[in-house]
Image (spheres, rainbow, N blue to C red):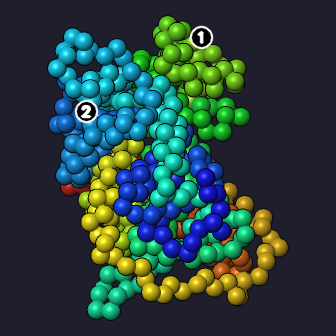
Amino acid sequence: MNKTLSLLSNQTDLLIIGSGAAGLTLALRSADFARITVLSKGDLREGATFYAQGGIAAVLDESDSVDSHVEDTVIAGVGLCHRAIVEQVVEKSADAVSWLVRQGVPFTTKPITRDMNPRLSEEVAELSSLHLTQEGGHSHRRIIHATDATGKAVFETLQRKAEAHPNIKLLEECTAVDLVTQTPKGSSRPVCVGVYVLNQETAKVETIKAKFVALATGGASKAYLYTTNPDGASGDGIAMAWRAGCRVANMEFNQFHPTCLYHPHAKSFLITEALRGEGAKLELPDGSRFMPRFDSREELAPRDIVARAIDFEMKRLGCDCVYLNISHQPSEFVKEHFPTIYQRCLEFGIDITQERIPVVPAAHYTCGGVVINATGETDIENLYAIGETCFSGLHGANRMASNSLLECFVVAFDAATDIQEKYKATEFASAVPEWDESRVTESDDEVLVSHNWDEIRRVMWDFVGIVRNSKRLNRAERRIKLLREEVRDYYVKHPVTNDNLELRNLALVSELIINCALQRKESRGLHFNLDYPNTLEEAQDTILSPKKH
């Protein structure tokens, strides 16, 4: 695998920033007609995909239907989902899973029934053999998974395929700095023509020309002190798109996963929702259940409801965590269905077949993002956003479990089709300006970066968390503005590093989250404001435009 930017020519047909499920899928779907370069700012597997435990939501069972999946998604999204997009994604869910099966993803299976019905095609028989589980918000078993390590299985399969393809280069330790755009004469719409990229090996910023650029950098949950996300989830793609002139939407809807392992050495280990799908119960320290008091769906209520219930009980009792209990299930069942969680908890002295799991909510998923159309293109021509980076309209005010990986594949499929249709008619820009750092000096005060990073995340956790009010949001807005000024001043005076690039992006995305939250004068889904506890009759997206800020 090519690992350094120095091995790359200064141009590529399609430059994909991000190496998770969305980025690798777009690469594989485009590699037969274009030369592809995929950038990862760290190790390829240090993205959210690799750590995703749950699975992929898709309609495969005869008792299930597209309409049912659509309705569940819209209900979870509290009226803010774009129904046409939901239908588009769900209708393609079986095709997405079928493609992944053909790539060789080792999904968990059950005994197939083809012998009982020999007329089943091989592909249909293979899909019908997939084991399905159920998660919060879903009315049917429709979650395809690879035990409790689905993301790892998907990532490793797609990575092997990408490494073997002659038209795909995978480059690590390469951090995108900013997009390069040009506005053609006689047009008002800018075109993306390349990217400035920090080669971490040489500490130099290089310019790469590209016919097409795709942002697949994941979300921005690292804006919060406690998160299930890997360290790189600093909102890079969202921030770069905003600076280039793209609109963003619904950034106030930050999903907090209800069940993150509570342990001083666990470093944000997620406990998949599938445990609750298989009967795990949430309990208070005294062993009593509490979810029946909050929702008739109990432990299988959507994530926003479960996270708020846990937050409420922790604050009411002053306790550090609540507990998830699956010990009533047979020991072998637990070990077979959740081997990763069983082993990881055992490393911390917790035998989940015998003991309860201490859990707390943690920032998990960014439901908003860069505004895209139905084929993944942004406001800037030839610039695409896919996966958690984008705002497609699928998730509304609350993402339903396991719809995120599905969105990665379907939007990537549609973006690849759109790029292929434009490919032959698109030329490289004749000239792209080189990066200029002639006026910067070496920093002698790197502690400012780590201090501001920590302060941003604590401000966001304390004032823009699961339950908000206007006073907290206004306080956060004032503090983040000051921090952004400090970050901006530091950035323009010193050479770029991976750390100060992430800090710059994190500060910007935090401000966008706060601005969206202040504009929403209601409580809906993941955004709960004590000063506006009611949900308005008309559901509207919160859209921010750089032209107005």
Disc 2 packing (10 Å; few <14; some 14–19; many ≥20): many
Indicate which disc, 2 or 1, sits on the residue closer to the N terminus: 2
Q: Quadrant of residue 382?
A: bottom left
Give the residue at x 61% y 82%. 435
The amino acid on which the numbered mark 2 sits, given as a three-letter code, is Val
Coordinates of residue 215 in the picture (x, y in percent):
45, 62
The amino acid on which the numbered mark 1 sits, given as a three-letter code, is Gln
Coordinates of residue 305 in the picture (x, y in percent):
39, 36
- Please name the residue that numbered disc 2 is placed on: 59
- Locate residue 489 relative to residue 529 in the image: left or right: right
Extreme-bottom residue of the structure: 185
Disc 1 packing (10 Å; few <14; some 14–19; many ≥20): some
- Locate the C terminus by quadrant: bottom left
Q: Secondary structure at mark 2?
A: loop
- Locate residue 147 relative to residue 205 in the image: left or right: left
- Locate residue 434 relative to residue 185 in the image: left or right: right
Q: Which mark is residue 354?
A: 1
> Looking at the picture, does residue 131 appear above or below residue 362?
above
Residue 117 appearing in the image: yes
Disc count in the image?
A: 2
Give the residue at x 62% y 57%. 2
Cα gap from disc 2 to disc 1, whole angstroms: 34 Å
Give the residue at x 42% y 28%. 107
Give the residue at x 55% y 75%. 10
Return the residue nearer the eye: 444 or 324: 444
Return the residue nearer the eye: 107 or 472: 107
Coordinates of residue 47 in the picture (x, y in percent):
55, 48
Residue 287 appearing in the image: no
Extreme-right residue of the structure: 444
